[in-house]
Amino acid sequence: MFIYNTLLTIIQQGLCYGLVAMGVYISYKILDFPDLTVDGSFPLGAVVAITLINGGVHFSVAMIIAIGAGMICGAVTGILHVKFGISNLLSGILTMTALISVNLVLSGMKVYLPYTEGNLFNNDFINSFGAYDVYGNILVLVIICIVFKIIIDLFLKTKTGFMLRAVGSNEKMCVSMGRDSGNYKILGLAMANGMVAMAGAVYSQWTNVYDNNSGVGMVVIALASVIIGTAIFKNLRFVKGTTAVLVGALIYTGALNIIIAFGVPSGYLKLIMAVLFAVILILNNSVLSGGKKIKNREKHHA
Amino acid sequence: MLKLENLVKIFNKDTVDESVLFEDFNLFVPKGQFVSVVGSNGSGKTTMLNLISGTMGIEGGRILLDDTDITVQKEFVRARRIGRVYQNPSMSTASQMTISENMAIAVNKNKPFNLSQGLKKSQIAEFRDLVSTLDLGLENKMDTLVGSLSGGQRQALTLLMATMTPIDLLLLDEHTAALDPRTSEKIMELTKSIVERTKITTLMVTHNLRFAVDYGNRILMMDKGKAVLDKAGSDKNAVKVQDLLEIFNTISIECGN
Ligand SMILES: Nc1ncnc2c1ncn2[C@@H]1O[C@H](COP(=O)(O)OP(=O)(O)OP(=O)(O)O)[C@@H](O)[C@H]1O
Ligand SMILES: [Mg+2]
């Protein structure tokens, strides 16, 4: 029973993290931009959602606004980088740091906030499965993941999506097409952080509480998921990147939860997260080395 | 028509590393002219193309393309009218995308990159036919990532992509240098046929003196940021590889080698 419950937790948490990973897939994998905004835009999505929902706004509307808020953050990071020439890492750090205060202001200086109104996991539809039913939760999460996966997949096949991929692969390509590559970076970062903020909104509704610290380490979780996923499916090109990172998120969440289940005190969680990520990076560089290498080689030439 | 007026290019201005490449460089290329540019390493050929395409700014002078002053235009704005094949094969293709996908982007140059389908099934056959003119076997690799092609194959593909849409100026920087002799001959023929068919004004940098002599209707030899030989039309036709070699030798004797 314990194992079964752990498994159910892994699936739900993994799907939430999978949403973050799909956002980071856009910034890190498609755009080749290591975006640290994520640690701030994740709780931002959550606080926007809870404030609106507790204020009586329907959760669907609240989540759309959360996505918009995340997109603004991504755009800010993009503008800092593109228009003001600040390095990609620093731009993300700046936005993320500013968001710590923004999130506190939005939560009314509270570190925790409980949901007082019905939400994504607490409504007539879900409750028809039985209140707080875990299968209902999983169903909702699976639907959200699939919907957003399809949206991203379709987007990447459009002309805009093609150009976004081209910018990540080689900025010069975009320039030679007479386009400002900077605008595509801003667009990609906005989309990525919109996804992340939505993930934050979903996650907080799933836990039924807003936690101001919920974003700490989110970049690590997301990057680990992206790297695991893309490494596993590297030789299977018919598997979409979005599918790969969803699987990656489930695997990483699984590994974390299994370690915790062995009785490691929860204070060690971030340490475990970091060590596990380091192991993945080292494995990826030695055993699984692939895709990324081609890019690095190109950077030296340019 | 391309006009470079009194160009000044200074690297690392106001530092100890300051070096002046172009002091007062002038060049007029009438519409439809095909100029071969030769010159020793470091003579400023690539830099000239960089200044024209806006990859680098200039310290003085003006650049005109068909009566528009493009001196202060951003690189991506100029690129709408300029096609370029770089000396470095990885420069103007997206390595993480397939041949078809790269071509789909290229054919859409100067059209909106909106939310319509990026690559239509019907386009693939069209692209395959185009690629088969290269005779490099790429037509069987339409779904291969461009990053896994050889440098020469990428260079040839880049030439095709640069000329898929109408442009006013074509800049080729040693675009056959990475190719084997047979293929580079082929690509030169292809270049010639594209230039003749579309009548694009073309600047072609090459270290292959025979190509410089055999192709194009004007030859320009550069040395230390200056044109040391400039012959067009029938004068150009009289220029032989031997003549170019002699100038190269005189230059290096002057330099004391
Ligand atoms: N970004 C730069 N900073 C400083 N100096 C530069 C820069 N780019 C070019 N130069 C200098 O300008 C000169 C001309 O370089 P350029 O690349 O134009 O030569 P080239 O004629 O294309 O040579 P090659 O035949 O080797 O390609 C060289 O002396 C080079 O050192
Ligand atoms: Mg050069």
Image (spheres, helix red, strand yellow):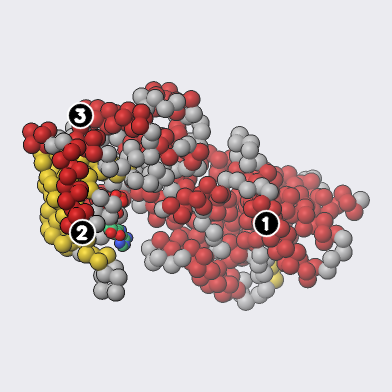
Mark 3 vs mark 1: tell me if same chain. no
For discs 3 and 2, the disc positioned in front in the rendered view = 2
Residue of label 3? B196
Name the residue at the left extreme.
B234
Mark 3 or mark 2: name the one nearer the start of the chain. 3
Between the C-alphas of marks 1 and 2, the distance is 52 Å
Residue drawn at point x = 67 percent, y = 56 percent:
A282
Q: Secondary structure at mark 2?
A: loop
> Is B230 positioned to the left or the right of A48 in the image?
left
Residue drawn at point x = 54 percent, y = 60 percent:
A35
Residue A50 picture location, percent across and down? 64, 63
Q: Amino acid at mark 2?
A: Cys
Q: Amino acid at mark 1?
A: Ile
Mark 1 vs mark 2: tell me if same chain. no
Residue of label 1? A282
Relative vertical location of residue A34 with respect to residue A165 in this rendering, above or below: below
Between the C-alphas of marks 3 and 1, the distance is 54 Å
Would you say the residues marked 3 and 1 are in contact, meaning their CB atoms lie under 8 Å apart? Answer: no
Relative vertical location of residue A151 with respect to residue A123 in this rendering, above or below: above
Residue A151 picture location, percent across and down? 55, 42
Q: Amino acid at mark 3?
A: Glu
Query: Within 10 angstroms of label 3, few (less than 14), some, or many (20 or more) residues?
Result: some
One can see residue A157 in this view: no
Dividing the picture into quadrants, the one containing residue B60 is bottom left
Dividing the picture into quadrants, the one containing residue A242 is top right
**Label disc, if present, on residue B255 of the rendered structure:** 2
Nearer-the-camera pick, B61 or A113: B61
Mark 3 Cβ and ligand 2 under 8 Å apart: no
> Is B51 positioned to the left or the right of B100 in the image?
left
